[in-house]
Image: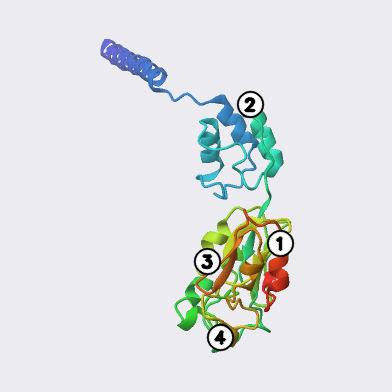
Amino acid sequence: MLSSILIAMAIVGGTGLVIGILLGIAGEKFKVLVDEREKKVRDALPGNNCGGCGFPGCDGLAAAIASGDAPVNACPVGGDKVAAAIGEIMGVSVGDSVKMTAFVKCAGTCDKAKEKYDYVGPKDCKLAMNNPGGGSKTCTYGCTGFGNCKNVCPFDAIDIIDGVASVDPEKCKACGKCIAECPKHLIELIPAENSYKVKCNSKDKGVEVKKACDAGCIGCGLCAKACQVDAITVENNLAHIDQDKCVKCGACKEKCPVKIIHN
């Protein structure tokens, strides 16, 4: 009886020992080597996991930077300080970066935008799109003002002021979450400092724009004619400024008859 128990224990122990040895060998053979630089880069990142860099969170960005698939200044939240720290880890220099901020292409505040009807549904921009005109405003392109962008902003950089979303460039980290959330595609990234921009998104003709909103672009093209560097185009009755070409001279703002260009 005792010998049978000892034999069983020996078999179990021997089997466990063999399995342990095999697992150890397999672990060494198939282990994934982690680049030490990846760990250091991950520690240098802010940890917001916002996805604004285009990668699945800070872990994904750290792996991409370590492998050379992303630049050291790819984190929009960390800014120059984080980029410099990562550049030191990776042994590369970091050029000057331009601070970007989200910009809402709408100036249709309550006193300027006309209303078609009283909206009584859920205060949600995406749900409002199911209603006629995508909401109660006569302008079907304008900001609904229910704050979906504000709700997803992890930096409290957006407020709804007088019926239109407004971005605080000091708080904005250009993560892009608001851009992805806006169902009317009203938000874009522009340089934060002294950028000239058209605060309108309407594609309607001028006469229809004036019927819907007192602050809309009428597509007259005077801004484009005034621009000496061809930074402005008018397509689908709407002016747009190419920030890469713009020299911030202000000629477009001076010529705009409806004063819809801001800086």
Marks 3/4 in contact by CB < 8 Å: the verdict is no
Q: Residues within 10 Å of mark 2 (few under 14, many from 20)?
A: few
Q: Residue placed at 61% from the left, 83% from the top?
A: 213
Marks 3/2 in contact by CB < 8 Å: the verdict is no
Q: Residue placed at 63% from the left, 55% from the top?
A: 245
Residue picked out by circle 2 = 91
In the structure shown, which secondary structural element does the residue marked by tag 1 occupy?
loop
First-in-chain label (4 vs 2): 2
Q: Would you place residue 241 above or below residue 96 in this image?
A: below
As drawn, the label of residue 185 is 3
Residue placed most toward the observer, 142 or 215: 215
| Disc nearest the viewer among 1 and 3 | 3
Drawn side of residue 111 relative to residue 180, left or right:
right
Drawn side of residue 94 relative to residue 6, left or right:
right
In the structure shown, which secondary structural element does the residue marked by tag 2 occupy?
loop
Residue picked out by circle 4 = 207
Residue lying farthest to the bottom in this orientation: 117
> How far apart in space, not on screen, are marks 4 and 2 (Cα)?
58 Å
In the structure shown, which secondary structural element does the residue marked by tag 4 occupy?
helix
Q: Residues within 10 Å of mark 4 (few under 14, many from 20)?
A: few
User: Which amino acid type is shown beneath numbered disc 2?
Assistant: Gly
Q: Residues within 10 Å of mark 3 (few under 14, many from 20)?
A: some
Residue picked out by circle 1 = 168
Q: Quadrant of residue 47?
A: top right
First-in-chain label (3 vs 4): 3
User: Which amino acid type is shown beneath numbered disc 3?
Assistant: His
| Disc nearest the viewer among 1 and 4 | 4
